Every structure is written in structure tokens, then in C-alpha cells.
Image: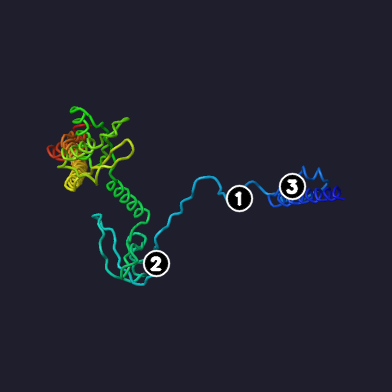
Amino acid sequence: MAKYGSRNMLSIAAALMVVSSLCVSNVMGFTSSSNSRMFGITTSGVSTSSTELFLRRGGRPRGPVRVIEVKPPMNNEIEFDELRVTALSSSGKDEALGVMSKSDAIAKAKELGNLDLILINAQTKPPVCKIADYSKYRYIKEKKAKEVKKNSKASELKEVKMSYNIGDHDYQVRKKNASKFIIQGNRVRCTVVFKGREVQHDKIGVALLHRLQEDLGEICTMEGKPRREGRFLACTISPRQEVVKKIGENKRAAEKAKKKEKDQKKKDKADTTVAASEAAAVTAEVNDEQKPTSVLDLNEHDENVNESLDDLLGGDDLTDDLFS
């Protein structure tokens, strides 16, 4: 009996395995052909595409990520009735047009060249709107953002490495490099490297780092104290506020000089164009003055001669008798 009971248990377990495999295959969207052939059971599986299976497993379709642009409220999308309106003047600066209703502002935008009324700041009372072409407004905004990002670039962390028993010449080279990095506005990580049993001379390394900071004390300060990190002893020095301020002033002066040079080039080009047009006008005037005089009309000359002969001979009849 025990023998037959164990056989029944095995058959029940096998049946449960078959049923579970069929259920899993139906859920995943395909049929188990091996089980069907083995046990003579056919199942109608649900045909599922690879994309559906991929999405069902929690993935996302491949391809470039689509970026949806969030536009500010414009024209009739603005929910406020009273607005403070500005417009771009011919000089390139914003010109205040005063407080007006939304309908008047939209009409003003259409009057200025079928432009858009763009909501700039909804937190003020009344909200601030600007009349401009949206594509041009977006271009200027992106350009300003790039300039701000470029000018506010974070300082880099440079590194200077040396040993605790560094020679004087090598020390001067490291100090020169650190000074160059500091003047550029970067922070510098000064590291003393120990090898083997040299770790026991960490006090000499601390003294070396303090010496470097004192030699560059006019342009930098040490952030905290030197710290031990395994075989390394390191500290970070950063430029003083005076150095950072001077770097900013030099940068602004360079940008100003660059802009001045660009404006001068535009002015020179305009002057060259005006001079060329004036020279062309003078050349045309000279050519007009040097044109040849009109050719004598022979027919008119003959008529004048005939009239003078008639006057001398006393009439047309006498002239006809003489020349007949």
C-alpha cells in the first residue's frame, strides 16, 4: 500500500507541475509545445508581440528621448485681465508701455507687427508681459542662459604632488604650478606621497604643506588642516577673494575690449561702404562732365543757309531764277 501511495503522490506532483507550467505559458503569451506533445494536451496561447512583452516587463521603447518644450502662456492663454506690458524698442532694450487690459495688449501686439504677448512674471501685481516674436524671444533667452552658464563655470580642482624630502628645485616647480592654478581661479589639492616606512615622517609632510601655503599666502588660503589618507597627506588651498575679484574684473575688461573691437570693425565697414558710394557718385559726375558736345545737325545748317541767301537776294523768285 505504501508503494502504491508513493506512486499516487508522484503522479499528483507531476500533474501539478504540468498545470503550473501551462498556466505560466498562458500568462507569458506562448504555449509549451513540449508539454503538449508529452501529455497530449493542446492549449490556445495568446499571441503577443515582442513590443508588448517588452512593455509588459516594465521596459521602455528604444529610440531618442523626446523633449517636450514647455511654453509660457501667450496671447489668449493668459488668465489675467490687467497686465503690465513691455516691448522691445529699436535700441534693443525693453520699453515700458504701461498697464493695460489683456485685450488692449493683444491688439497692441498685433499693431506692432503681428507679434506675441508673452507672460514673463505672473507673481507680480499686475503680472508682467512682453510683446515680442516668440521664436526670437526664445533664442535670446537661450543665448543668455548659455552666457550665464559659461561665465559661472565652477572652478576646477587641480593637484600638486610631492614627496616629504623633495629638493629645493622641485619644490619651486610645484610652487610655480600651484601659483599658476590659483591665479586662474582654481582650487589646488596639495598632496605629500609617502612610500613604505616614510609614513612615520608625517610631521615633516605637514610642515611642508604649511610652508607651501605660507609661500603662496598672498593669493591663497588653506581649507582646514592637512589630513592623512593612507599613504597620502593632503590639504586644499583656494584663491583669496581679492584674486577672484581681480579675475572677474579682467574677464569683464576682456569682454568689453572684444565688444569694442567688434563695434569698431562694424563702424569701419560702414565707413568704407559710405566712402565707396561717395567715390562712385563723384566718378559718375566726372563722367557726365566729360561727355562730348552734341554733333551739329547738317539738315538744320542747310536750312539756315537757304534762309540767309533768300534774305540777301531779296526773295524766293530771284533765287529760283538764278539756280534754275
Distance CA(mark 3)–CA(mark 1): 18 Å
Q: CB atoms at circles 3 and 1 under 8 Å apart?
A: no
> In the rendered image, which residue does mark 2 sit on?
78
> In the rendered image, which residue does mark 3 sit on?
31
Q: Residue at x 78, y 45 (%)?
A: 35
Kind of element beneath mark 2: loop
Of the 4 image quadrants, the one containing the C terminus is top left
Kind of element beneath mark 3: loop
Q: Position of residue 176 (x, y in %)?
A: 19, 33
- Foreground pick, 243 / 247: 243
Kind of element beneath mark 1: loop
Q: Residue at x 25, y 64 (%)?
A: 96
The correct choice, above or below, for 64 with respect to 293 in the image is below
> In the rendered image, which residue does mark 1 sit on?
57
Is any part of residue 317 visible from this angle?
Answer: no
- Foreground pick, 61 / 100: 61
Report crowding for label 3: few under 14, some 14 to 19, many 20 or more residues within 10 A (C-alpha). Answer: many
- Foreground pick, 86 / 277: 86
Report crowding for label 2: few under 14, some 14 to 19, many 20 or more residues within 10 A (C-alpha). Answer: some
Distance CA(mark 1)–CA(mark 2): 42 Å
Q: Identity of the amino acid at label 1? A: Arg
The chosen color scheme is rainbow
Q: Nearer the viewer, mark 1 or mark 2?
A: 1
Q: Position of residue 273 (x, y in %)?
A: 21, 40
Of labels 3 and 1, earlier in sequence is 3
- Residue 125 quadrant: bottom left
Q: Nearer the viewer, mark 3 or mark 2?
A: 3
Q: How many marks?
A: 3
Report crowding for label 1: few under 14, some 14 to 19, many 20 or more residues within 10 A (C-alpha). Answer: few
Q: Identity of the amino acid at label 3? A: Thr
Q: Residue at x 81, y 43 (%)?
A: 38
